[in-house]
Amino acid sequence: MAGFPEDFLWGSSTAAYQVEGAYQQDGKGLSIWDVYSHLPGTTYQGTNGDVAADHYNRFREDVRLMSELGLKSYRFSIAWARIFPGGVGKPNPAGIQFYSQLIDELLCYDIVPFVTLYHWDLPQALQDQGGWENRELIVSAFAQYAKTCFEQFGDRVKYWITLNEVINFIMLGYRDGLHPPGVRDEGRAIEVSHIVNLAHAEAVAEYRQLVAQGKILDGKIGIAHVLLPGFPISVTPEDVRACEYYEGMDFHWFYDPVLKGEYPPLIWDYYQRKGHTPTVLPGDLDLLKNTVNDFIGINYYQSTFLAYNPPDGVGSATINTSGQKGSQPESGIPDLFKKVRNPDIEYTDWDWAVYPEGLYEGMKRIRARYGNIPLVITENGLGSKDAIAPTGEVLDQSRIDYIQKHLIWCKKAIAEGIPLFGYFAWSFIDLLSWLNGYQKQYGFVYVARDRNLARHPKQSYWWYQEVIQTHGESLYLSQEKTAES
Ligand code: BGP
C-alpha cells in the first residue's frame, strides 16, 4: 500500500473560543458564545470559555509542546471579535498582534499555520443587528474581516479555511435552539444556510484578488464541513430511501452549493413543500459556481445509521450531554428518516458511533459526487473522560485506538488515489466542549484545571509523536502488537 505523501501535514486542531480564554483581554469584543454561555441553562453546568485553557496567555508554552510532539501543522481559528471588537470598523491592534505572534512562533518551529476564519464565535455586535440573517450586513462584514486577516497574516499563512462546520452552527443555532442564537425555526435556518454560502464565496473572492495583486502568498483556501455519512440499517427500499433523504439533507445540502453552485433537487423540493426554500437572488448561484475551492476540510467523528421513520415517528430529540452511554434517544424527521443504533458498532460514552470505515467511505462519496478535489481531515478524535493513574499519568489508550483506526483508513484512501494531504486530530490540548464543558476531553495534552491549568502530555501525545516520526509506519506495528496480544 502506498504510504502517506512525503509532505503530509501531520497536525492537530483547536478553536479560539474553546482554547484561548482571555475573553475580555486586550480590547476583545464579546462574541455570541461569550454572551450565550453566560445565560442560565444553556451549557453543561454553566461552563464557558472565559478562561478555557488560557492559550491566549500561554501560547508560547503550547507551541513548544507542539514542537516536541513533532506537529507539522497546527490548525487554529481567529476570534473575529479580537480583530474587530464590533464586528466591523476599526481593527484592534492587540488582536492582530496576538495572531501575528502566534504565527511567528509556529513558523519559528517549522509548524505550518492552518487558519480558520470562523469557528462559530460571531461578534455579538453583529448578532445584535441580525447576525447571519442580515444578508446585507453579514456577507460584506465577513468578507471585510477575511480580507483584513489575509492582509495581516497572508505573508506567512498559506492555508485558509473560511468557515467551520456550516451545518452545525446553522442547524444547532437556528433549527434546534442549542447553540446561539438559540432559535428553533427550520425556515430561518435554511435561509441562513444560503447567506453563509455567499459569505464564503465573497471571502474566497477577496483572497483570489489579493493573490492576483501579488500582495499575499499564493496559498490554498477552502471550507471545513462535517462529514457524517449515512448508512441504511437494512437493505429494505424504505431504509435505503430514508438514508437518501438523510444524506441529501445533512450532506449534499451543504456541500453542493459550495462545490457545484447548486442545491440538491430532492431536498430543495422537500423544503419547497414546507415553504422553507431560501431566497436565492439573481447572480447568487453564478457566484457560487464560479468560486473555486482549493480543498475541502473534513471534520469526521462518526457515521449515522438510518431507518424509515413513519409519519407518527420520532422527531428532534435532546442530545447526550452527560457522557452516560445509551442516554441519547432516537431522533429523526417523521415520514423521512430516523437515526438508529447499530448493534454491531461500538459507541462512545456520548453515543457517537465509532466507525472508521465511514471516513473512508465518505471520502469516496465526496470523490464520486464532486471529483478529485484535494481533501484534508481538519478534525477527528475521541471525546472521553480520561483516567489518571496514581503516578499522575493520563491514560487515554481509547483515544490512541480511535485515531489509529481512522489513520489506517486514511492510508487506504490515499492508496486508492484520494488526494488527502493532511490529518488534524481534534484536539491538540484539552479544551472546552461547546455543550459538554471540560468533562469531555479530546487533547493530546492534559490541562490540570485544579492546578493552575498546568499542561501534561498524555499517553496519546507520545504515541502520536512516534506516528509522526515514523511517517505513519508505527501505526501498523502497534496494530500488529494489538492483534497479537
Ligand atoms: C466539532 C467542532 C469542534 C469540536 C468537536 C467536538 O463539531 O468543530 O469545535 O467541539 O466537534 O465536539 P464536542 O465538543 O461537542 O464533543
Image (spheres, rainbow, N blue to C red):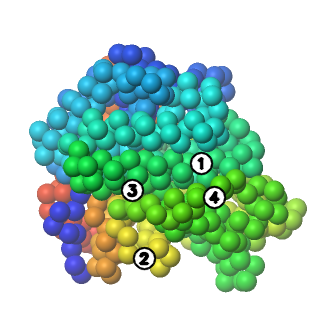
Q: Which residue is mark 3?
A: 222
- Nearer the observer: mark 4 or 2; the answer is 4
Q: Give the vertical position of 284 relative to 152 (above or below).
A: below
Secondary structure of the residue carrying numbered label 2 = loop
For the residue carrying disc 1, how many other residues have a C-alpha within 10 Å: few (<14), some (14-19), or many (20+)?
many
Spot occupied by residue 337 in the image (x, y as percentages of width and height) = 73, 67
Quadrant showing the N terminus? bottom left
What's the distance in space between the residues labelled 4 and 1, CA to CA? 14 Å
**Residue at numbered disc 2:** 371
Which kind of residue does numbered mark 2 sit on?
Gly
Q: Is mark 3 within 8 Å of ligand 1?
A: no
Relative depth, front residue between 3 and 112: 112
Q: CA distance from mark 1 to mark 2?
A: 25 Å
Report how far apart the C-alphas of labels 3 and 4 lie in the structure: 24 Å
Residue 242, picture quadrant: bottom right
Q: Mark 4 or mark 1: name the one nearer the start of the chain.
A: 1
Task: Describe the element under mark 1 as helix, strand or loop.
Answer: helix
Q: Which mark is residue 485?
A: none
Residue visible at 37% across and 24% down? 91
Nearer the observer, disc 3 or disc 4? 4
| Amino acid type of the residue tagged 4 in the rendering | Pro
